Amino acid sequence: IAKAMNNLIRDVEANVGRPRGLPSGVQAFDHLTGGFRQGIISVVAARPAMGKSSFGLAIARANALAGNGV
């Protein structure tokens, strides 16, 4: 697991700012992650009232505007 995590961290650091997947609607998030990629499960978790629903709506809006199915 450690080797896989090191490879993932290297990949993310090498591609910071390059879009590689679907947009999230939050530029800072997309800059760090490259967007959502096929085959990767993303879990959004936080305490109540921290903006999870707003983040989900931003993801849906950004992808609808990009012409992707929502």
Image (cartoon, rainbow, N blue to C red):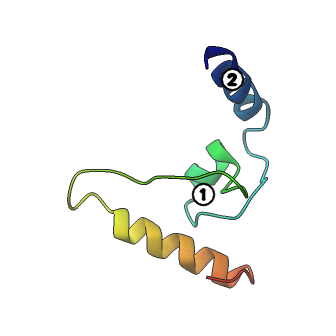
* Residue under numbered circle 1: 27
* Residue 32 against residue 55 in the figure, above or below: above
Q: Which mark is residue 55?
A: none
Quarter of the figure with residue 64? bottom right
Residue that protrudes farthest toward the top in the picture: 2
Residue drawn at (56%, 80%), measured in percent from left and top?
61
Amino acid beneath label 2: Ala
Amino acid beneath label 1: Gln
Q: Earlier in the sequence, mark 1 or mark 2?
A: 2
Mark 2 lies on a secondary structure that is helix
Crowding at label 1, few (<14), some or many (≥20) Cα neighbours within 10 Å? Answer: few
* Residue 34 against residue 14 in the figure, above or below: below
Residue drawn at (71%, 34%), measured in percent from left and top?
12
Residue drawn at (58%, 67%), measured in percent from left and top?
25
Mark 1 lies on a secondary structure that is helix
Which x, y percent locates residue 2? 61, 15
Which x, y percent locates residue 22? 70, 64
The image quadrant where one finds the N terminus is top right
* Residue under numbered circle 2: 4
Quarter of the figure with residue 21? bottom right
Crowding at label 2, few (<14), some or many (≥20) Cα neighbours within 10 Å? Answer: few
* Residue 17 against residue 13 in the figure, above or below: below
- Closer to the camera in the image, 4 or 49: 4
- Closer to the camera in the image, 47 or 25: 47
Which x, y percent locates residue 52? 36, 62
Q: How many marks?
A: 2
Residue drawn at (77%, 54%), measured in percent from left and top?
19
- Closer to the camera in the image, 31 or 67: 67
Camera-side mark, 1 or 2: 2
- Closer to the camera in the image, 35 or 17: 35
